[in-house]
């Protein structure tokens, strides 16, 4: 099982250059572990793509349907004091946004404070850098074909 940041889940929902790689990675290990807020972050990404004209209405509807289906089967790290405390610490030591700090904190809690024990999948450069410094093994998505 790997921890998937929202940035790595989005290519499973909408066509992007990294979609084939994300699909291959998910097919090899279909149990996704995510932060409790990942569904909201993914919905935000889909809505933004639709507002910006990168997705038409029917494609956005399909993406939201995929999100609901995927979310029905993934495992979530619930919010709690441990996640909040870790996120606050990560904000003080890494140049992260709040949502990214919460993602990293959720992965840290899921790894029971042993980051090397959990692989993390993300497409976010800042989150990747912070996760690497914290000791997480990062999973690279296969390059576009």
Image: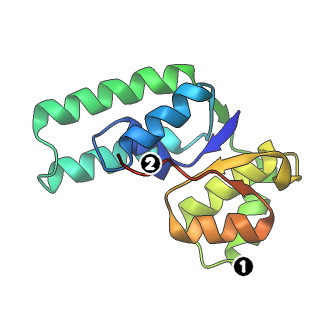
Q: How crowded is mark 1: few (under 14 residues within 10 Å), some or many (20 or more)?
A: few
Residue at 70 percent across and 63 percent down: it is: 131
The reply to whether dot 2 and dot 1 touch (C-beta < 8 Å) is no
Residue corresponding to mark 2: 41
Secondary element under disc 1, as helix, strand or loop, is helix
**Image location (x, y in percent) of residue 139:** 63, 50
Q: In this view, does 131 lie above or below 117?
A: below
Left-right relation of 59 to 142:
left
Q: Residue 57 carries which label?
A: none
- For the residue pair 120 and 93, the one nearer the viewer reads as 120
Q: Where is residue 1 in the image (x, y as percent from the top left)?
A: 71, 33
Q: Residue at x 21, y 36 (%)?
A: 60
The residue drawn where x is 67% and y is 73% is 91
In the rendered structure, the answer to whether residue 14 lies left or right of residue 78 reads left
Sort mark 2 into few (<14), some (14-19) or many (20+) by Cα contacts within 10 Å: some
- At 29% from the left and 39% from the top, the residue drawn is 14
> In terms of secondary structure, where does tag 2 sit?
helix
- Display coloring: rainbow
For residue 63, above or below residue 50: above
Give the distance between the C-alpha atoms of the residues marked 2 and 1, in whole angstroms: 22 Å
Pick the front one: 27 or 39: 27
Percent position of residue 82, x then y: 81, 52
Whichever of labels 2 and 1 marks the residue nearer the N terminus, that label is 2
* Residue matched to label 1: 92
Asked where in the image residue 115 lies, by quadrant, the reply is bottom right
Residue 137: quarter of image: bottom right
From the viewer's perspective, is 132 left or right of 17?
right
> Which percent across, then down, holds residue 70?
47, 25
Left/right placement of residue 85 relative to residue 42 reads right
Q: In which quarter of the image is residue 99?
A: bottom right
């Amino acid at each position: 099982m790997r921890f998937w940041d929202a940035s790595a889940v989005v290519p499973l929902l909408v066509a992007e250059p990294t979609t084939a790689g994300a699909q291959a990675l998910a097919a090899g290990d279909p149990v996704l572990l995510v932060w409790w807020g990942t569904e909201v972050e993914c919905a935000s990404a889909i809505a933004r793509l639709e507002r910006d004209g990168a997705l038409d209405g029917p494609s956005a509807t399909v993406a939201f349907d995929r999100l609901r289906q995927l979310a029905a089967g993934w495992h979530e790290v619930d919010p709690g004091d441990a996640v909040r405390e870790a996120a606050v610490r990560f904000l003080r030591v890494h140049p992260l946004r709040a949502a990214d700090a919460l993602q990293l904190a959720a992965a840290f809690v899921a790894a029971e404070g042993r980051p090397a024990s959990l692989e993390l999948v993300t497409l976010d450069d800042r989150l990747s850098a912070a996760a690497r410094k914290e000791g997480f093994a990062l999973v690279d998505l296969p390059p576009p074909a």
